[in-house]
């Protein structure tokens, strides 16, 4: 899973899979979910992210994964 924030557009994309998006659906104003060709969730796009989520803090709890921070 990857999270990418673009300050120029104030959008946050949460990439849940390496599969390509085949279909998208807006589930709330400015929140779009992407599905692959088999109907599996592959990503979430959040417009105006700084107004909808707290971008200054990320808490990860009990996930069995390697955490890698990349600052750009």
Image (cartoon, helix red, strand yellow):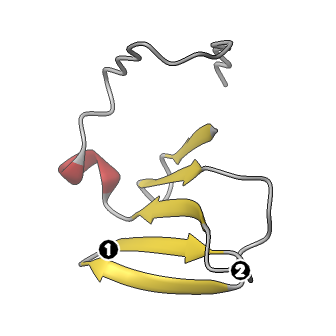
For the N terminus, the image quarter is: top right
Crowding at mark 2 (Cα within 10 Å: few <14, some 14-19, many 20+): few
Q: Secondary structure at mark 2?
A: loop
Decide which of tag 2 and tag 1 comes sooner along the chain: 1
Crowding at mark 1 (Cα within 10 Å: few <14, some 14-19, many 20+): few
* Residue under label 2: 38
Q: Residue shown at 48%/46% (left/top)?
A: 7
Q: Which quarter of the figure has residue 31?
A: bottom left
Question: Would you say 69 lies left or right of 25 here?
Answer: right
Q: Secondary structure at mark 1?
A: loop
Does residue 41 lie above or below 5 as drawn?
Answer: below
Q: How many marks?
A: 2
Label 2 and label 1: CA atoms lie apart by 24 Å
For the C terminus, the image quarter is: top right
On residue 70, the disc is: none
* Residue under label 1: 30
Q: Position of residue 57 (x, y in %)?
A: 31, 20
Marks 2/1 in contact by CB < 8 Å: the verdict is no
């Amino acid at each position: 899973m990857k999270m990418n924030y673009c300050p120029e557009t104030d959008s946050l994309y949460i990439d849940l899979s390496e599969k390509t998006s085949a279909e998208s659906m807006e589930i709330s104003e400015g929140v779009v979910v992407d599905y692959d060709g088999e109907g599996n969730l592959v990503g979430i796009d959040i417009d105006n992210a700084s107004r909808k989520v707290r971008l200054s803090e990320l808490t990860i709890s009990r996930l069995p994964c390697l955490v890698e921070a990349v600052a750009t």
